[in-house]
């Protein structure tokens, strides 16, 4: 019985260490990911049609578009709550820009792209 209890204790300790390590490393990776500062062209789409195309800036952790909106970092870029119920997701596109879905009330209503200005 003692050997079994010791094995369970070692197993529980190993799991705790693995979970703690994953949380620590995950938090570091999450905190370092964000949307890069710079000037972009923002394009919003719905049903394959461009709804709005305008200049955008990312500065100080904010997306400056029609207003100034806080960017919440994620492992793939970030997301912005433009107003209650309206969220856009900014995933890195591999070419220096960002693209992702736009939601309103949890339903996907379109998408957004941020294309860097060179």
Image: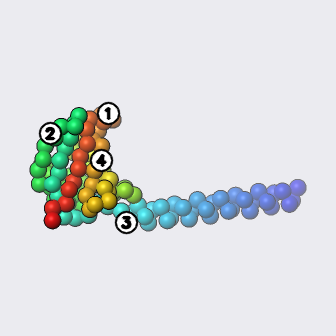
Spot occupied by residue 86 in the image (x, y as percentages of width and height): 25, 40
Gap in angstroms between the C-alphas marked 1 and 2: 18 Å
Which residue: 30% across, 47% down? 100
Gap in angstroms between the C-alphas marked 3 and 1: 29 Å
The disc placed on residue 100 is 4
The disc placed on residue 80 is none
Which residue: 41% across, 61% down? 30
Disc 1: CA contacts within 10 A as few (<14), some (14-19) or many (>=20): few
Gap in angstroms between the C-alphas marked 2 and 4: 15 Å
Q: Quadrant of the N terminus?
A: bottom right
The disc placed on residue 51 is 2
Q: Nearer the viewer, residue 42 or 48?
A: 48
Mark 2 or mark 4, which has the lower sequence index? 2
Disc 2: CA contacts within 10 A as few (<14), some (14-19) or many (>=20): few
Helix, strand or loop for disc 3: helix
Helix, strand or loop for disc 1: strand
Spot occupied by residue 78 in the image (x, y as percentages of width and height): 32, 54
The nearer-to-camera label among 4 and 1 is 4
Spot occupied by residue 52 in the image (x, y as percentages of width and height): 13, 43
Q: Is residue 47 visible?
A: yes
The nearer-to-camera label among 3 and 4 is 4
């Amino acid at each position: 019985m003692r050997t079994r209890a010791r094995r369970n204790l070692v197993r529980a300790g190993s799991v705790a260490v693995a979970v703690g390590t994953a949380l620590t490393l995950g938090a570091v990776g999450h905190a370092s990911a964000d949307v890069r500062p710079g000037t972009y062209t923002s394009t919003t789409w719905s049903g394959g049609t461009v709804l709005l195309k305008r200049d955008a800036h990312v500065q100080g952790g904010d997306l400056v578009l029609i207003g100034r909106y806080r960017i919440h970092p994620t492992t793939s870029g970030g997301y912005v709550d433009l107003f209650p119920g309206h969220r856009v997701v900014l995933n890195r596109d591999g070419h220096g820009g960002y693209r992702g879905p736009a939601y309103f009330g949890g339903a996907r209503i379109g998408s957004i792209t941020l294309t860097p200005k060179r």
